[in-house]
Image (cartoon, grey):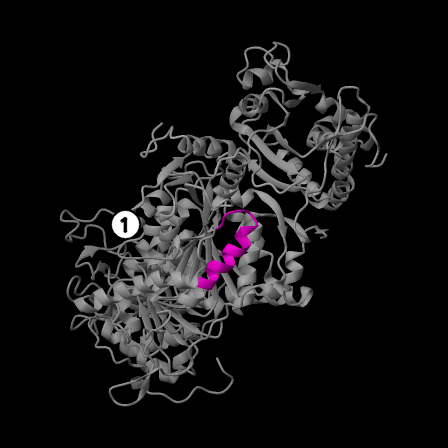
Amino acid sequence: MSDTLAPATTRKDWTSDQEVRWCPGCGDYSILAAVQMLLPELDVRRESTVFISGIGCAARFPYYMRTYGMHSIHGRAPAIATGLALARPDLDVWVISGDGDALSIGGNHLIHALRRNVNLTILLFNNQIYGLTKGQYSPTSEVGKVTKSTPFGSLDAPFNPVSLALGANASFVARTHDMDRKHMMETFRRAHDHRGSALVEIYQNCNVFNDGAFEQITAKEARPRNLIPLVHGQPIRFGIEREKGVMLDGQGRARIVDVADVGEEALLVHDERREDPSLAFMLSRLAEGPYSPTPIGVFRAVERPDYGSLMDEQLAGAQDRQGPGDLRALLHSSPTWEVSA
Amino acid sequence: MTDTATSPRPPEELDSVVIRFAGDSGDGMQLAGDRFTSVSAVFGNDLATFPDFPAEIRAPAGTLAGVSAFQVHISDHDILTPGDAPNVLVAMNPAALRSNLGDLPRGATLIVNADAFDDRALGKAGYASNPLTDGSLAGYRVYEVPMTSLTQEAAKEAGAKPRDAERAKNFFALGLLSWMYHRPLEPTLAWTEKRFADRPLVAQTNILALRAGWNFGETAELFESSYEVHPADLAPGTYTNVTGNTALAWGLVAASQLAKLPLFLGSYPITPASDILHELSKHKSFGVRTLQAEDEIAGVGAALGAAFGGHLGVTTTSGPGFSLKSETIGLALTLELPLVVVDIQRAGPSTGMPTKPEQADLLQAMYGRHGEAPVPVVAAMSPAHCFEAAIEACRIALRYRTPVVLLSDGYLANGAEPWRLPDVADLPDISVTFATEANHTGEDGEPVFWPYLRDPETLARPWALPGTPGLEHRLGGLEKQDGTGNVSYDPANHERMVRLRAAKVAGIARDIPPVAVDDPSGEADLLVLGWGSTYGAIAAACRRLRARGRQVAHAHLVHLNPFPSNLGDVLSRYRQVVVPENNLGQLVKLVRAEFLVDAQPITKVQGVPFRAGEVEAALAAFLEGRRDQRGNR
């Protein structure tokens, strides 16, 4: 990024001329809007912003952004973005992915990008279903899901994306949802500003193949009951009257309690900057699925050197010690001998 | 003593010799062979090597599966192969003897570590009786040397325990061979001290073993003679000894310098390609970024991402990894971004024989992708040629914005030969120009950037880097509208794009040298067409046939896709076209399909390269009509 401030922009400046072709009513529209409305608020330039996606409904995203972009291969966006981010630390690289793309076919690339802490902002659109291939269950679908490929119900236990990311020692992990633009924008802003890999799971409604998957958390009337807002430095409380809270019990487990029973001082105070990811992990396991009280917000935001900076330091160090590479010297670096005419 | 100590008898002069060191994979045979080679190179011999080792790091000691061998051919004249059969076999144990004896012609010299031939070791190697005593080696000049005990005895001076001292017996063998062939000891002494600087006892033990081997040769009345192989009369210049993988890695560094682009390697370790990753990871002062990726797909993906960002993106692999990269190569092809995919071929299919060479990935390189997906293919033909081939692959990739497959194999990768170093100033300029401004006028009359407007000559599209204001564009795997690059399902547009991509690759034929034909008399009726690592064996076979008064022509392809533009003419000039390959006949299929020529295969798929003698015999059969037009005997 240049030293001078980026020119002022509006949402329109970030919108490409391509017609958006998601199904009417798809949660992807609100995510796209949140990103296009956030970017003018950030000190970023169109030409230095790159969106890289894999395959899936969400992966069409880059076509709709008036930035550089690549719609790549199913699951491989984190790998391709890793190469770009390492080659070009001056760029803002975003990865757009879905639950099948990031957690099934591309699960390996996701966890390795996170453990390396490559400077990427990864948005994971989780709708718990395969949309583009028209309705098979996904690696985040609940057990027993009846779909075209599982007429007798799915048998495999789902991934929890936040738990998975924390297990990979991701330095920034958050969850937001497509029904709250303000929360999305704030979460994306935090993720963007984070140096290193930032993973944001977005509960995203697929109104065609999995309508209402998250409504027990995200619907306006349900939120007070089931959405547990995570706010750094605040006791974790929720409920219509904020009467519920989260505390650690005597065995060190996170439990949902009535504040009246335990008193506010007994509640867990959320600390996203805690080095040890165990507490964040426990919070990620609080709900078995998006139908009981579920934390939304930033689970973890810790500082850890990003891979690209470490790589650049190694290169700079080598150049300091040895000077810039000399091709002739390289070719003569093994023993040589002369043959005269 | 000094390394110039004279032997009691004047040395016999040889014009060349082939030596094979063979032992258990823990016996340090690769090291002994490598040291012998380095010293011979600096001494000025021409040489070629063939390391042959098991994939297992430590196969069960003393078994046939664990045998590791290193063959080196040194010569006072220009040679092309590591030699068909060893003149000398050093066998450190019964298994090494048993698995290598079949290659040894009668009358050859056999030097065995007599200490290793006890009942247990003989049993492990499957010998019912001791070959040293049962008369089965009668046809050879056998020297039984108690290498283990002599090494242990010599190492006592350094205070090494017998068990540790025993591990230096490869240095004893190296010392003995150095005496036999008048190799100076100094370079190896200096190397040993440097290599084991932090382990003085190991250094001292090895040095004592090396000297003991030399002294044994000189003082034991065992050997009739020592031998001299004079320096070769090579073209004037500065030489170094180089393996194919090192030359290839250096070629990539050179290409990055010549292109003025940083080099980015995304790679996953795989035999026999890993040494390129190792070598490139050292050269950070050249701005080389190496990523040891989580898998093969990530390796090529990261390289492609770096290419999108304006780096010279490269991935290195071998067959199984090459298969995994197919989808990303297809993406690079449709994105029309430069990418170099290096495949160091090994014996397949599947895991196959990882340390053994084969040339069976040619058709995969040509066709191993879904859809109509042509990519240029370049093949290296000798260890040193890997340097030039790497630069050429990068040149094509950058100029035509296309993935290029660079084929080498395990034989070239680990084999070494003297290389006359090029003058850096003579290397080609392969620099590229990035798009910086709009290239089209939109419907509204405003300037716009169309990422798929092509250069009329090369058909390459402009390369606009992220970070360039005003040229923001989206690339993708979906079919693109010609010009704008927008997603398009228009049937006629798809056909146009498929044909454009094919025409772009085909057009590279105008930009590569015509294939040269080696036909000294101009009277040959038979053309041998080769590609890749068979070069040495074919060229040597042709020399031998010509020395016997037979006429044969040889053409060797570096560019497999597209073919050089004169290839059809060349093929049509000869009555017979014969194609030796280490596969079941892949290039032969391509030339038959492309040129309707009745080319005939000579094939070998044993995980070992052709010997010159094998090619010579097969060609002689064709010349004498003992093989018909179908290649049957």
Question: Which SS type dominates the magenta stretch?
Answer: helix
Which of B207/B446 is in front? B446
Which of B293/B189 is in front? B189
Instruction: Give above or below for A226 relative to B94.
Output: below
Amino acid at circle 1: Ala
Residue B206, horizontal then vertical, whole percent: 74, 35
Span of residues in magenta: B380-396
Q: Taking B539 as reference, is B469 left or right?
A: left
Q: Taking B395 as reference, is A35 left or right?
A: left
**Residue at the spot x=67%, y=18% of the render?**
B142
How packed is label 1: few (under 14 Cα within 10 Å), some, or many (20 or more)? few
Instruction: Give above or below for A302 relative to A183.
Output: above
Residue B512 drawn in magenta: no
Residue B439, horizontal then vertical, whole percent: 35, 82
Instruction: Give above or below for B356 relative to B145.
Output: below
What residue does disc 1 label? A157
> Residue at the right extreme?
B1
Residue B497, horizontal then vertical, whole percent: 26, 66
The answer to whether residue A323 is visible is yes
Image quarter in which the N terminus of chain B is found: top right
Instruction: Give above or below for B588 relative to A32.
Output: above
Q: Secondary structure at mark 1?
A: loop
Q: Taking B265 as reference, is A29 left or right?
A: left
Image quarter in which the C terminus of chain B is found: top left
The chain containing the residue under callout 1 comes to A
Residue B395 drawn in magenta: yes
